[in-house]
Every structure is written in C-alpha cells, then in structure tokens.
Image (tube, rainbow, N blue to C red):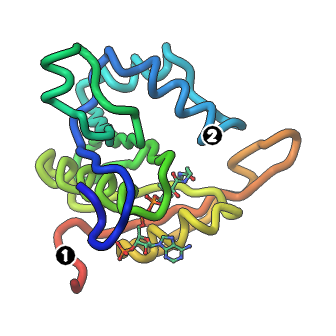
C-alpha cells in the first residue's frame, strides 16, 4: 500500500507471529521509550488466544521472503485484546508517520475485533499525545473517561484518556 499521491515506501499488512517479537521490541524502544514492552511481554501478548497482532512491513514482502527468507523493514504494528463485546487496542505505532500506516493498522484491528464479536473498541491514550488523539478522533473515536495519573513517566503522573468507537456503525466516509 502507498497513500495516494505519496512518495515513499510501499508496504503491506500481515499478521504478526512469535518470530517477530525481537523486531517489534526494537520498534517499541523507539516509539515508547518510557514504557516499552520487552520480548517476553510481547511473546506472551502475540501468542495469547484472545490477542490479534498485525505488522506493516515494507515491500519486498512475500516474494523477497520466499526467495531470501527476509522481508522489508518493520514499519509499524498494532494489537488488540478481544473481551466479549469489547475489544481493547493494546498498542499501535509506526516508524513512518503520516502516510496512512496508522489508519490501516487501526482498520485491521477493527475488522479483527468485529470478526471476534466485538461491538466497540476501547483505547487509552496519554493526554499529552496530541498526535495520536487527533488520529483517533479522525477515525471516529470519542473520549468517554479519564484515568487520573494512569501513566507514571520519569516521576511525573500523566492522565490517560479512554476513547471509544462503536464497531457496529461505520463512520461517514
Ligand atoms: C499515532 C500513530 C500510530 C498514527 O499513525 P500515522 O501512520 O501517522 O497515521 P496516519 O498517517 O494513518 O493518519 C491517520 C489519520 O489521522 C489524520 N491525522 C494524522 N495526524 C493528524 C493530526 N496531527 N491532526 C489531525 N489529523 C491527523 C490523518 O490525516 C489521517 O486521516 P485520513 O486517513 O483521513 O487522511 C503514529 O503517529 C505513531 O506511531 N505515534 C507514536 C506511537 C504512539 O503514540 N502510538 C499511540 C499510543 S496510544
């Protein structure tokens, strides 16, 4: 995929596997230096039956993988937990912002959540993460509550905003 009119890498989505945890752990350190998950936490997440994880990888993709055993660079990843009629977005991040990867990862998670029987998606976002909040709002999420002091970052307490989107009604295009 490449966003229309965008120069930049072409990329694809594929489900994550246990073989991907090391690459994801490196990306975690870049994207979430204050709260990165380690390989053990990631392995537990990805292998858990109620989780669904996806990667965005630079093309080369399948053909290169079949030929060389390698594929393009990891550009992003996301994961959800299925819990009955609700799904929770556990993580989402991209190394190439602004070319549609975040939206595509989120859409993949929403489809998996619907397929797993969820009627709504919940997520938590740091109050000071204005970019992510704007992306979620653009995707149809709205704030439903606040968890005061939820994140403790280098001794500072930061609120989490809880955001929700119904998965039973599609937003206007
Ligand atoms: C949040 C994040 C995943 C978004 O991914 P992204 O690939 O940059 O987002 P996209 O390019 O797909 O943009 C998604 C939509 O939000 C819109 N958007 C992006 N930034 C925006 C901004 N600052 N203000 C308003 N809208 C914005 C885009 O226009 C796009 O809408 P469109 O598809 O209708 O054009 C990415 O910024 C990221 O990885 N951040 C660091 C990790 C992080 O904070 N993760 C979230 C933790 S809760």
Q: Locate residue 145, reporting x and y percent.
A: 56, 67
Q: Nearer the viewer, mark 1 or mark 2?
A: 2
Image height of 153 relative to 136, above or below: above
Residue drawn 32% across the image and 15% down it? 19
Q: Residue furthest right?
A: 155
Instruction: Tell me: residue 60, above or below residue 85.
Output: above
Q: CA distance from mark 1 to mark 2?
A: 30 Å
Residue closer to the observer: 9 or 165 = 9
Q: Which mark is residue 32?
A: 2
On screen, residue 84 versus residue 131, left or right, reads: left
> Which of the two discs, 1 and 2, labels the residue nearer the N terminus?
2
Assign a secondary structure to mark 1. Answer: loop
In the image, taking residue 77 as reference, residue 162 lies left or right, namely right
Neighbour class for label 2 at 10 Å: few (<14), some, many (≥20)?
few
Which residue is tagged 1?
170
- Which residue is pictured at 70% across the width and 63% down the height? 128
Q: Is residue 124 left or right of residue 56?
A: right
The quarter in which the N terminus is drawn is bottom left
Q: Total marks drawn?
A: 2
The answer as to whether callout 2 falls within 8 Å of ligand 1 is yes
Res. 139 image quadrant = bottom left
Where residue 58 appears, as percent x and y from the top left, is 32, 40
Tell me what residue is drawn at x 22 percent, y 15 percent: 68
């Amino acid at each position: 995929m490449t966003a229309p009119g965008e120069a930049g890498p072409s990329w694809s989505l594929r489900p994550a596997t246990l073989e991907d945890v090391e690459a994801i752990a490196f990306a975690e350190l870049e994207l979430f230096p204050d709260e990165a998950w380690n390989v053990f936490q990631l392995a537990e997440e990805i292998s858990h039956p109620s989780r669904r994880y996806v990667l965005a990888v630079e093309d080369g993709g399948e053909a290169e993988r079949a030929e060389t055993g390698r594929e393009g660079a990891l550009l992003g990843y996301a994961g959800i937990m299925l819990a009955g009629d609700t799904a929770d977005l556990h993580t989402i991040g991209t190394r190439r912002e602004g070319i549609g990867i975040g939206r595509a990862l989120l859409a993949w998670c929403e489809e998996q959540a619907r397929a797993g029987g969820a009627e709504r998606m919940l997520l938590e976002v740091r109050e000071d993460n204005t970019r992510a909040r704007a992306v979620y709002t653009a995707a149809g999420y709205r704030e439903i509550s606040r968890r005061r002091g939820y994140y403790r970052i280098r001794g500072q307490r930061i609120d989490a905003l809880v955001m929700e989107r119904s998965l039973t009604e599609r937003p206007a295009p």
